Image (cartoon, rainbow, N blue to C red):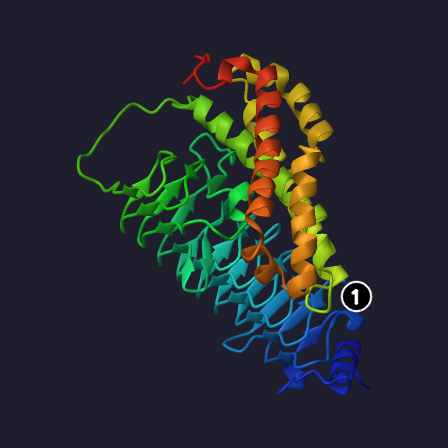
Amino acid sequence: METRYALKVRQLLEKGVDIPNPRTVEISEDVNLDRISGDNVSIYSGCKIYGSSTLISKGSQLGYEGPVTVDNCQIGPQVELKGGFCKESVFLNRACLGFGSHVRTGTILEEEARIAHAVALKQTILFPYVTLGSLVNFCDCFMSGGTGRKNHSEVGSSYIHFNYTPNQDKATPSLIGDVPRGVMLNQRPIFLGGQGGLVGPCRFEFGTVTAAGSICRKDELKPGRLVIAQRGKEARVRFVPGKYWNLKRTVINNIIYISNLMALMNWYVNVRSQFLSEEFSEPLYYGLIEKLDIAIDERLKRFGSLCLKNMNQNLSTKWSEIKELFSDLRYYEGNKKKKEICLESISRGIKRSGKNYLLVIKNLEPSGTESGTKWLQGIVDHLTSEILTIIPSFSPGKDSEQE
């Protein structure tokens, strides 16, 4: 008697999906086969597909280099998941994942973002063209920068983002590039040299280069800087559990990171929604919105845990007020005039070039690019300043109770 998962495999074969070794493929009962394209999709030996929200678009390949597990992921056209584990993540057109990768909840790989073999991601957002080398742990990061496949932001092999502190919290997201300028696909790339690391939460400006082997612990907010942070001298100081040596920087960087994600939500809702097409389907779009919502919720949760640790009275007593304000401002739309100028420019771009997202954005009129960046940056600035009114001692230039 044919098992239920074998029946689903047979139905996919009848649909036109290429499954060279059908007996080795497992598809759970809750998978909706209508969300799996039969157009040039290949599913190789040992693959497992789970989840009612899983979407596999035309031209995608799963498991070419080794088995891959897909659990409630939305996979766009021409995506290659070469081997590993992927859960509750989104992969847009021509994104690529190397063998042995581990991609967990809240991760977004936008168009043509690529990761090589044995890469770990969680709550990570990579903008178009961003490339990660092999043996990388890059959880709780946002990265943008670059203009195309030959001019892209990159993370070298054996790189790690340190996202867990000795005080046992994860209020450590790093903003590498930013949303307001990054979405325009016209910024200088960022390069993080291999065999190095970044201690979150950090912020890096576009054009930043870190030397191979560097462990970076500080922000770099000047453009076009080479950072060499290698071990020259050994320093040993007394460790005091619960003490944060630079609490103000941690708080500000968390607020700015969350504000950037909320600006990105505005971009997805107002701009990405205009590109719905066969290449960017409605289920893929809603998967993108869902994963960004997950990312925002995660950052609020981690920031809240930090605030409630009672190492600073301002934070612990004001967290409920901060949380409520973030909730009220979550869908703050920013300057309507700048937004409309940007959207009108995008609409004209779509009329000229069709619904090719990368082509339209890279060829926006200067007025559209400028207005769009100012619109999104205005959202970031407004959210940041409003939150800091609740905890003014953490504002830049102010002395907080604990540094």
Mark 1 neighbour density, 10 Å: few (under 14) some (14–19) many (20 or more): few
Q: How many discs mark residues in the rendered view?
A: 1
Q: Residue 137 location, x and y as percent?
A: 44, 52
Establish if 36 lies above or below 283.
below
Q: List x then y, in percent, for residue 399.
A: 43, 12
Q: Position of residue 312 (x, y in %)?
A: 51, 16
- Across and down, in percent, residue 321 comes to 67, 19
Residue 298 appears in view: no
Residue at 28 percent of width and 42 percent of height: 227
- Vertical side of 68 occupied by 334: above or below: above
Q: Secondary structure at mark 1?
A: loop
Q: Nearer the viewer, residue 239 or 262?
A: 262
Question: Mark 1: which amino acid?
Answer: Asp
Q: Which residue is mark 1?
A: 30
Residue at (52, 33) in percent of width and height: 171
Please indicate, yes or no, whether residue 353 appears anywhere in the rendered image. yes
Front residue of 121 and 355: 355
At 73% from the left edge and 69% from the top edge, which residue is drawn? Answer: 278
